[in-house]
């Protein structure tokens, strides 16, 4: 299984390098976005290849380690899940046994495949880019891979999705500011 995953990762890395080479002639802002989108696509392919392992996480009765829970929480927030679906609202802590682990089924993968990083979506403060960055800050794919390659794949996807979304939001805000400045000049 690990050999197959390593092989798939190597193929995805080669495809990513090929995609990035095609971007050399683009303007810097567009190049940054396209490069990040290519990284997100590669991370998504790797994540979907880990479907069996990630689904298995939902069968764990014992809560994973804190870093793993953080990256899983970030994944679910990025996909639009809310605190009520993850937390015991009385204790304000993640409820692994009764809530969070139940989200790791086929619906999760439907949401991953349907995820549109460019969509304008109303989000709760804890689902916004800054909060997600804080949630995964200090985590590394290598450390998470030591626990399970599934956690590492989730981290890679969340990191790529957050970085891509950040670029899109910044470009959207810059365009809105430029448009606002142009309207003020009239």
Image (cartoon, grey):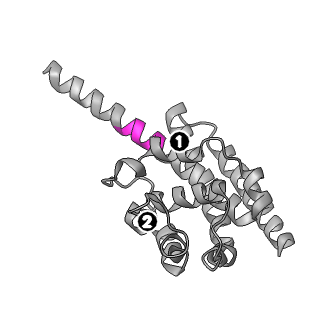
Q: Nearer the viewer, residue 32 or 148?
A: 148
User: Which secondary structure, mark 2?
Assistant: strand
Q: Is residue 147 left or right of residue 186?
A: right
Identify the image quadrant of the C terminus.
Answer: top left
Q: Nearer the viewer, residue 186 or 1?
A: 1
Look at mark 2 in the image and give the residue it sits on: 88
Nearer the camera: disc 1 or disc 2? 2
* 79 shown above or below 175: below
| Residue 47: percent from left, percent from top | 64, 66
| Residue 20: percent from left, percent from top | 66, 46
* 146 shown above or below 8: above
Q: Is residue 102 left or right of residue 82?
A: right
Mark 2 residue crowding within 10 angstroms, few (<14) / some (14–19) / many (20+): some
Q: Residue at x 77, y 67 (%)?
A: 8
Mark 1 residue crowding within 10 angstroms, few (<14) / some (14–19) / many (20+): few
Identify the image quadrant of the N terminus.
Answer: bottom right
Q: Nearer the viewer, residue 146 or 121?
A: 146
Of the image marks 1 and 2, the number of the one nearer the N terminus = 2
Tally of numbered tags: 2
Look at mark 1 in the image and give the residue it sits on: 134
Residue furthest top as drawn: 185
Q: Residue at x 68, y 59 (%)?
A: 65
Residue 169: in magenta span: yes
Q: Is residue 121 left or right of residue 4?
A: left
The numbered mark at residue 160 is none
Q: Residue at x 41, y 47 (%)?
A: 128
User: Which secondary structure, mark 1?
Assistant: helix
| Residue 145: percent from left, percent from top | 76, 58
Q: Is residue 114 visible?
A: yes
Q: Which residues are magenta?
A: 166-172
């Amino acid at each position: 299984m690990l050999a197959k995953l390593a092989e798939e990762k190597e193929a995805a890395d080669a495809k990513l390098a090929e995609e990035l080479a095609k971007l050399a002639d683009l303007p810097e802002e567009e190049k940054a976005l396209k490069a990040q989108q290519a990284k997100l696509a590669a991370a998504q392919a790797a994540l979907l290849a880990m479907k069996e392992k990630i689904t298995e996480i939902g069968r764990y009765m014992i809560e994973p380690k804190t870093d793993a829970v953080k990256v899983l929480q970030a994944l679910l927030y990025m996909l639009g899940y809310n605190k009520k679906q993850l937390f015991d609202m009385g204790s304000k802590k993640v409820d692994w046994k009764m809530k969070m682990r139940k989200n790791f089924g086929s619906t999760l993968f439907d949401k991953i495949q349907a995820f549109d990083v460019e969509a304008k979506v109303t989000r709760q403060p804890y689902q916004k880019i800054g909060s997600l960055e804080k949630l995964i800050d200090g985590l590394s794919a290598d450390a998470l891979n030591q626990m399970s390659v599934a956690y590492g794949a989730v981290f890679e996807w969340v990191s790529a999705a957050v970085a891509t979304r950040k670029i899109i939001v910044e470009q959207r805000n810059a365009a809105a500011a430029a448009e606002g400045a142009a309207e003020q000049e009239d």
